[in-house]
Image (spheres, rainbow, N blue to C red):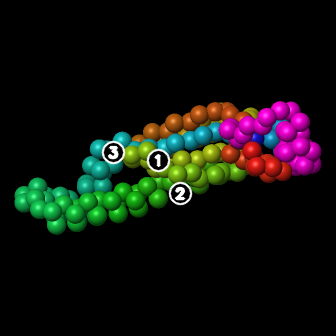
Amino acid sequence: MRFGVVFPDEAAIRAAVLDSNRELLEDLLERHSSTAELSLKASYDEEAVLAELVATSPRLARMRERYRERASMERGMALGEVTAAHLAARRDHDAERIIGTLEPLAVEIRVGEVGLEGGVVSLALLVERDRVEQVEEWLESLSRDLSPPIHFKLVGPLPPYSFVDVPLAVAA
């Protein structure tokens, strides 16, 4: 069960959770007896990714140079929009690559909101416990292959909270 669920006593827990969901709970316990959750957040070094975008996009490089020569609100807005579009395309491409790399190792993947500045992707990975080290190794290899590198923050193994949803018979 997710954090933050509060019941007044044991009888309320039995009535709301255990009695009405016994079969589901038994299935979940069996399903997750060998799994763990890994939380992965990937992010860019903003300066490195922007430098690479400018180096690989002549249009963006020209717009930046024109803005530096004669700054104006219109040029600044246009430069910001084009830069944001390039960053979004790059982020989408890299997120797909990260997910595609990890899919063979994961039982299930849930994509979350990217909340960090420079964030690429936020994932909850359900993996077999004996594959946790393999996920770490694949991420190290992927990090070396990406240019500019993406910084990975992997937390876990954790209980599979993101992959369990138990309905409650009463509002908690």
Horizontal placement of 79 versus 68: left or right?
right
**Residue 40: where, in percent of width, then height?**
56, 41
According to the image, label 2 marks what residue? 96
Q: Nearer the viewer, residue 116 or 144?
A: 116
Residue range (magenta): 2-29
Horizontal placement of 118 versus 95: left or right?
left
At label 2, which amino acid type do we have? Glu
Mark 3 vs mark 1: in front: 1
**Residue 9: where, in percent of width, then height?**
83, 33
Mark 2 vs mark 3: in front: 3
Residue at 22% over, 66% down: 78
Q: Nearer the viewer, residue 30 or 100?
A: 30
Residue at 72% over, 47% down: 163
Q: Nearer the viewer, residue 13 or 130?
A: 13
Q: CA distance from mark 1 to mark 2?
A: 17 Å
Q: Secondary structure at mark 1?
A: loop
Characterize the local packing of mark 3: few (<14), some (14-19) or many (20 or more) Cα atoms within 10 angstroms. some
First in sequence: mark 3 vs mark 1: 3
Horizontal placement of 20 versus 108: left or right?
right
Q: Nearer the viewer, residue 26 or 1?
A: 1
**Residue 28: where, in percent of width, then height?**
84, 45
Characterize the local packing of mark 1: few (<14), some (14-19) or many (20 or more) Cα atoms within 10 angstroms. few
According to the image, label 3 marks what residue? 46
Q: CA distance from mark 3 to mark 1?
A: 15 Å
**Residue 31: where, in percent of width, then height?**
84, 45
Task: Look at the image and tell me in which quarter the C terminus lies.
Answer: top right
The answer to whether any part of residue 66 appears in the image is no
At label 3, which amino acid type do we have? Glu
Indicate the quadrant where residue 80 lies.
Answer: bottom left
According to the image, label 1 marks what residue? 115
First in sequence: mark 2 vs mark 3: 3
